[in-house]
């Protein structure tokens, strides 16, 4: 049986498949172009190879315009014993503002709930409209890092200099 979160409007959600691997990198790099335009950094790290996403404990869901279609966005959720963490959300800019991101977030939340997590977390930029304000609309609220996993993420961001692009925050959504 197909879970009821698979369909949202005309969007089709499915687990990432081997045929999506190259596409995931392309989607993330194109989505990052919005950050590049905004921040104009001297250098920017390209998306990691998609294979790396699939070997980390968790799941990758893709969204397409039609069931079985080519991915236009994806969400990557990392799972630990204690945490479901939305690691990456990316949608092709050419498909932006059509509900694909929101559909992916909702699917990620439903899958985390199905896997018996009571909440899902993420880290994001506080003032960028398509970051914290978007996630607030999706039911997330700002919180402080409390687990070793989240403190490690914070420390990695500090080391990478992410704060130079604006305030970074952690957010959580209680699942029900």
Image (cartoon, rainbow, N blue to C red):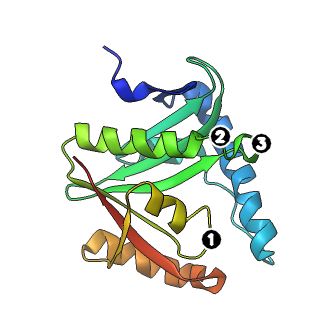
- For marks 2 and 1, give the CA distance: 18 Å
Of the two numbered discs 2 and 1 in the rendering, the one whose residue sits closer to the viewer: 2
Q: Secondary structure at mark 2?
A: loop
Mark 2 residue crowding within 10 angstroms, few (<14) / some (14–19) / many (20+):
few
| Contact check, label 2 and label 1, Cβ < 8 Å | no
Image quarter where the N terminus lies is: top left
Residue holding disc 2: 98
Q: Secondary structure at mark 1?
A: loop
Q: Is residue 59 shown to the viewer in this render? A: no
x, y percent for residue 123: 45, 68
**Left or right: 115, with 53 as reference point:** left
User: Tag 1 or tag 3, which sits nearer the N-term?
Assistant: 3
Q: Residue at x 26, y 74 (%)?
A: 148
Q: Residue at x 51, y 48 (%)?
A: 52
Q: Is residue 167 shown to the viewer in this render? A: yes
Q: Is residue 13 above or below residue 99?
A: above
x, y percent for residue 35: 72, 66
**Left or right: 151, with 93 as reference point:** left
Q: Is residue 164 above or below residue 17?
A: below
> Viewer-proximal residue, 169 or 130?
130
x, y percent for residue 106: 41, 42
x, y percent for residue 119: 26, 56
Residue holding disc 3: 94
Mark 3 residue crowding within 10 angstroms, few (<14) / some (14–19) / many (20+):
few
Residue holding disc 1: 128
**Left or right: 124, with 142 as reference point:** right
């Amino acid at each position: 049986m197909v879970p009821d979160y698979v369909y949202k409007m005309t969007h089709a959600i499915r687990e990432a498949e081997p045929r999506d691997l190259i596409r995931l990198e392309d989607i993330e790099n194109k989505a990052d172009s919005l950050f590049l335009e905004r921040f104009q950094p001297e250098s920017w790290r390209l998306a990691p190879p998609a294979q790396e996403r699939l070997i980390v404990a968790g799941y990758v869901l893709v969204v397409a315009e039609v069931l079985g279609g080519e991915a236009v966005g994806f969400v990557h959720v990392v799972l630990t014993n204690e945490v479901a963490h939305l690691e990456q959300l990316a949608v092709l800019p050419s498909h932006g503002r059509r509900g694909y991101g929101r559909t992916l977030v909702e699917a990620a939340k439903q899958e985390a709930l199905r896997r018996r997590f009571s909440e899902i977390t993420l880290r994001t930029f506080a003032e960028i409209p398509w970051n914290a304000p978007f996630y607030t609309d999706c039911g997330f609220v700002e919180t402080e890092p409390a687990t070793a996993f989240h403190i490690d993420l914070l420390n990695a961001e500090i080391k990478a200099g992410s704060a130079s692009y604006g305030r970074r925050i952690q957010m959580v959504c209680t699942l029900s």
